Amino acid sequence: MNENSPTAFPDSWASLRVVLSHDWLNGMRGGERVLEWLCRGFPGAPLYTLLYKPDAVSAAIRAHPVHTSWLQRVPGILRWYRYFLPLFPGAMERLRAPAADLLISTSHCVAKGLIPPSGARHLCYCFTPMRYAWVFYEEYFGGSALKKRLLEPRLAKLRDWDRRASDRVDHFVTLSRHVQDRIRRFYDREAAVVYPPVDTSFFTPADVEPGGFDLIVSALVPYKCLDLAVRAYTRLGHPLKIVGTGTEYTALRRLAGPKVEFLGWRTDEEIRELYRRCRCLVFPGEEDFGIVPVEAQACGRPVVALGRGGILESVQENVSGVFFREQTEAALLAAVEDGAARRWEPAAIRRLAERFAPPVFLDGMDREIRRCVSGQAG
């Protein structure tokens, strides 16, 4: 996010006493991009989270008083925190928030489990119902039948907690119609859709010649399905650059041929330059929305993506991207070849991205905050 963005925030926000909660703060992914706009909109609001690594998040987030759970004191927790998943609900519920008018949780796991202060309303911007317990089971835990039998009782408890925690939310807002349907199925609740913001004043096209490589920008974690792209590009032989860090780094390196390059962490400015110069952005996994493809489109570059999930709401087929329907190397490579053969119109691609500019997000959030605080939503 451009910290010098001139974006105006709603005047009514200044009079609200707000508490923020977020699952954990150890990197800047899509969820943290949403959070940092709320941090800017509610300066000084206390922020509650399980874990916090200050140097891994933006200045907008660091500017807030951050309160962590007891898990923060566990040696090595920032490396091994996923193994503590069954303890997350209790750790979040033990945190105590101060008096406020409104609690805003940004949650894909347990942030919505923070107990609201007495008299406060609770708006949850839900990225998804708890991903580990409801969806992407095999992507996270593998396909072992034995492991599934051993973990199922714990996952059942997590699903039960997740449903009960959802009852403490006064109003759900979510980032796509895809997740809206998931909230309806798992929580039996309705949710308003407010698409997440992308700083289109920062991510812009440039007068450069693209095409020397294709690009992935992603956390290196199992459900992103990056192994599919690495294997496919190892066969294809066209250069692929991968930006990101995560638990799958070593495994992906083992799969990669000489034309697949791992760039690790990069600044926003470096990522913008990569977007501008790439032939296309590759997005091989199913996502709840996908902020990265919108950033690439804001830079005028097309997207090759799996045609499932929230990506169907942010990429327009044949205008700003190409979809592949089967999650196979052959299908991905066919889509890449299709995209490479087309003549794309960068201006048309960017216009689609401008639907997700920050003022659109802030207007939507202002509407839903007003509904929540007034008691009209629920």
Image: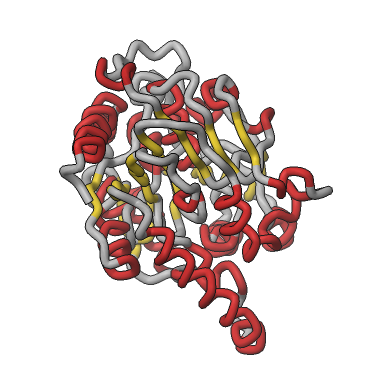
Query: From the viewer's perspective, is residue 147 above or below residue 211?
Result: below
Depth check: 304 or 37 in front? Answer: 37
Q: Residue furthest right?
A: 75
From the top left corner, tell me how far across and down residue 189 is, in percent.
26, 61
Q: Look at the image and tell me whether residue 346 can be seen.
A: no
Query: From the viewer's perspective, is residue 371 above or below residue 377?
Result: above
Relative placement, left or right, of 19 versus 368 is right
Q: Residue at x 38, y 63 (%)?
A: 334
Residue 197 image-quadrant placement: top left
From the top left corner, tell me how far across and down residue 288 is, in percent.
38, 55
Query: From the viewer's perspective, is residue 150 above or below residue 15?
Result: below
Q: Residue at x 54, y 64 (%)?
A: 228
Q: Residue at x 45, y 70 (%)?
A: 134
From the top left corner, tell me how far across and down residue 311 is, in percent.
32, 52
Depth check: 346 or 272 in front? Answer: 272
Q: Residue furthest front?
A: 118
Q: Residue at x 60, y 83 (%)?
A: 148
Q: Look at the image and tell me whether residue 182 can be seen.
A: yes
Depth check: 241 or 132 in front? Answer: 132
Relative placement, left or right, of 229 versus 188 is right
Give the total number of marks visible in the rendering: 0
Depth check: 137 or 169 in front? Answer: 169
From the top left corner, tell me how far across and down residue 162 is, in percent.
45, 64
Colour option used? secondary structure
Q: Residue furthest left?
A: 376
